[in-house]
Amino acid sequence: MKFDIVTIFPRMFEGPTREGILGRAIERHLVDLRVHDLRDFTDDRHRTVDDVAYGGGPGMVLKPAPLFRAVEAIREERGVPEAVILTSPQGRTFTQAEAERLSRLGHVVLLCGRYEGVDERVRELVATEELSIGDYVLTGGELPALVVLDAVVRLLPGVVGDEQSVEQDSFRRGLLDHPQFTRPAEFRGLAVPGVLLSGHHAEVRRWRKRQALERTIDRRPDLLAAAQLDEEERAILREVQAQRKEESDDACD
Ligand code: 9D3
């Protein structure tokens, strides 16, 4: 998969794209990533990328021409991308479903917003869509672009060694993960639940499903409505709900 990222801070991508699973995917050419410095697409001596807002007000706005030229150059060198994504607080929220959709494309361009915003004509003429990574204020679109890159790349075939771990992604199925333990069997007085040491695979699977369901009910009840549960999980969910109803009735008595 081809990715092109356009930014005024290309060095922000150096560390994250060299390390870990993302770094290895790039090394192994499973991803063809290019990071472009927006200033290379300016035409003045000062390499100006921003300007004051028409109508006044504080802060600077990214000029349209350098972004426009950057995407033109990418099209010429690298072919026509299926998506040109502007990262911005006004975008749709990036989700696992969005990551899966993008992972099915062959070529994606990410334009990193900065300052107070981007000239509106970039949205109209260059970007095909706009994405935010959530409702908090960042200083620019570089970290969001890295978030999108990371979430999409790990879905590509061969990137994550164990295909099962991608299949079983909790967000994919709409449930949170069950608790995990490793050695030692007892640590500072806290023991690993006996069932995990028992060797009863069916029991372990049921325990994990129950834990995942209980955690989701407690912490992310919003996820449960859309969760894709198998038959065993639906049965465990009814059990948990019945048990909790008993407990809340007991509390009334
Ligand atoms: C919404 C705040 N804006 C109103 C004055 C100003 C503003 C703040 C921060 C405009 C742009 C930015 C920089 N943020 C991004 O470019 C950005 C972002 C974010 O801040 N949060 C979550 N996702 C994203 S994607 C790009």
Image: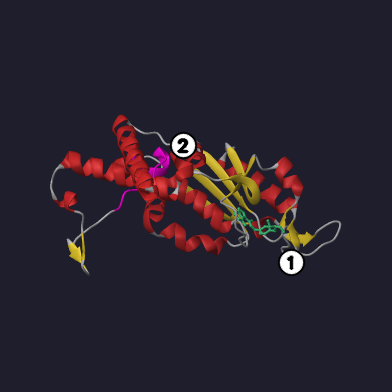
Quadrant housing residue 205: top left
Q: Horizontally, is 27 left or right of 111 in the view?
A: left
Taking depth in this image into account, of 210 and 116 the one nearest to the observer is 210
Q: Could you tell me which residue is drawn at 34 percent across and 47 percent down?
A: 250
Where is mark 1, residue-wise? 46
Q: Could you tell me which residue is drawn at 60 percent across and 53 percent down?
A: 135
- Count residues near mark 2 (Cα–Cα under 10 Å), then give few for <14, some for 14-19, many for 20+: few
Residue 26 spot, x, y in % from top left: 42, 51
Magenta-colored segment: predominant secondary structure:
loop
Q: Nearer the viewer, mark 1 or mark 2?
A: 2
Kind of residue at badge 1: His
Q: Quadrant of ligand 1?
A: bottom right
> Can the viewer see residue 160 in this picture?
no
Residue 19 spot, x, y in % from top left: 40, 60
Q: Is mark 2 within 8 Å of ligand 1?
A: no
Q: Is mark 1 within 8 Å of ligand 1?
A: no
Quadrant housing residue 114: bottom right
Query: Distance from label 1 to label 2 (Cα)?
Result: 54 Å
> Can the viewer see residue 65 in this picture?
yes
Q: Which residues are magenta?
A: 168-179
Q: Could you tell me which residue is drawn at 76 percent across and 45 percent down?
A: 121
Q: Residue furthest left?
A: 199
Residue 183 vertical position relative to residue 153 in the rendered view, above or below = below
Residue 225, numbered label = 2
